[in-house]
Every structure is written in structure tokens, then in C-alpha cells.
Amino acid sequence: MKKRIMASVVLILLTLCFACQWSREKADPLGIAGQTEGEGGLLASNSMNKKKVYLTFDDGPSDHTNEILDILKENGVKATFFVVGKETAYAKKSYQRIVLEGHTLGMHSYSHNYDQIYSSLDAFKKDINKLHNYLYEITETKPFIYRFPGGSSNSCVKDINSYIQYINQQGWLYFDWNALSGDALNFDTSAKQLNQNILKDVRRQDVSVVLMHDLHEAKHTVEGLDSLIKTLKKEGYQILPITENTKPVQHKSVDK
């Protein structure tokens, strides 16, 4: 009798398991439910996307912005632009194009005047809120990421903790970098050398946030961009825009 009961229980359990499996396969014939969502809306298995590169451009828009966007578009990749406040018609169209083409529009400061921005916490708040509201007015998109002029480790302010706390209180994320080209240190540095500087940093870590500049003077950055992207792709790196899911790279941080 006990054997018959046990056999019945086993049969019922097997039937339930089969039904659940059939239901899952019917609802998810490609097995997507077993995967995680990568950034940029891409679906990838848990073993993928370990090698990531985030290309970021500071200080734009500039007269190179459209060319940078063209190169990114031709290569099918997205980037992040930490912009400043410019009121020309060209700049406004550049902000809009960045958003429309799926890149991330980040805040860098309105004036980019270090003495003014870091003169006090109130001055800092006024500057960043002016930029935030300005970009929202133009693009109808609320920026959510920020990069401190000079980075969070800059020497322009003695104690940056209160500035960081303000960014955190707004629910924004701030990003520094762990790879850089050096394009703003010496504008005469060749495109080849700039790329070598970037690749040296990128190759020693799985996730890299690359600092470059969208400046009139940084023409060699633009010259080397296509080659840089192709090299990164060839070496298996996924090139992504920063999103709310991106783990921040921060030189300094404080509790929220």
C-alpha cells in the first residue's frame, strides 16, 4: 500500500515538473529569462560583458561634436558626454542630437570656471542646477550623472565632501575615470599616442571609464577615435554608455 502511495506521489510530482517546464518553454522559447539584461537594453548571459569600456567626453559641445557623433554612429556604439553650458544654436542642436542618438547626456558644470564653481557650496549648487534645468529645457531629458570639473579628487576645493553629499542628495550619480588619454594635458600629442595611453589603462582592468575631451583643441582625439573603437571591439570589449545601472568609478566618495 505504501509503495502504491509513494509511486502516485512521484507520478504527480513528475507531471507537475513537466507542466512547469512546458509552460516556461512556451512563454520563453529562446531562453531569454535565464539571461541578465546588459546595459543599453542588450540581453546577455551572465558570463558575458565582463570587459566593458565607457567612452566619455568632457567640456563639449565643440566644433568637433558632430564629427565625434558621426564616428560613433558609423561604428554602432554609444558614449557619454559630460557637457558644459553653451547657448549657441549649434550647441543646442548638439545636446539634442546626443540624446536623440541614444548617448548619455551628463552634466559637467555650466561655466566650467573652477574659481567660481568651487568658491562656495552655494555657488556650486547654483551652477549645477542652472545646467540641469538648461539641458532639460532643451532636450526634455533630465540629466542624472555628473562629473566634477577636475574630478572629485581635484585640488581646487579643500573639502569636497559637502559637494559630493549635495550630488548624492539630488539622486544623481557622479563619475570620475580610471583610464585617460591625456588629450587635455598636451594638445600636440598624436592620435596614436593618445590611443596607446587609453589602451594601456584599459587592458589592465575589466571595466574602464575613459576620459577624453570634446574640445576645439583636442583634434587628435577625434582623429584617433575610429581606430580606438575598432581596436577595442577587436579585443573583445563592449563599448557602452553610462546608465543608472553602471557602477560608478569615483576617486573620492562619502556616505549619502
Image (spheres, rainbow, N blue to C red):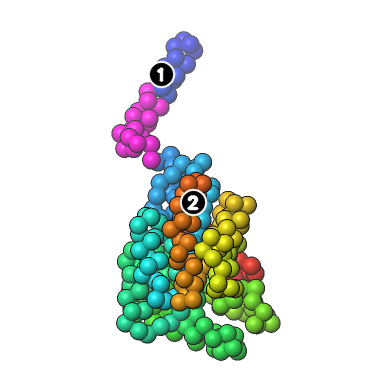
Badge 2: few (under 14), some or many (20 or more) residues near its Cα, within 10 Å? some
State the quadrant of the C terminus. Answer: bottom right
Q: What's the magenta region?
A: 15-32
Q: Residue at x 58, y 73 (%)?
A: 186
Answer above or below: position of 33 versus 141. above
For the stretch drawn in magenta, what is the main secondary structure?
A: helix
The x and y percentages for residue 185 are 59, 73
Measure the C-alpha gap from mark 1 to mark 2: 57 Å
Q: Which mark is residue 11?
A: 1
Q: How many marks?
A: 2
Answer above or below: position of 171 versus 133. above
The secondary element bearing badge 2 is classed as: helix
- Closer mark to the observer between disc 1 and disc 2: 2
Q: Which mark is residue 231?
A: 2
Tell which residue pokes out farthest to the right in this image: 158
Q: Residue at x 42, y 70 (%)?
A: 105
Answer above or below: position of 67 versus 228. below
Three-letter code, disc 1? Leu
Q: Residue at x 37, y 55 (%)?
A: 76
Q: Residue at x 41, y 83 (%)?
A: 86
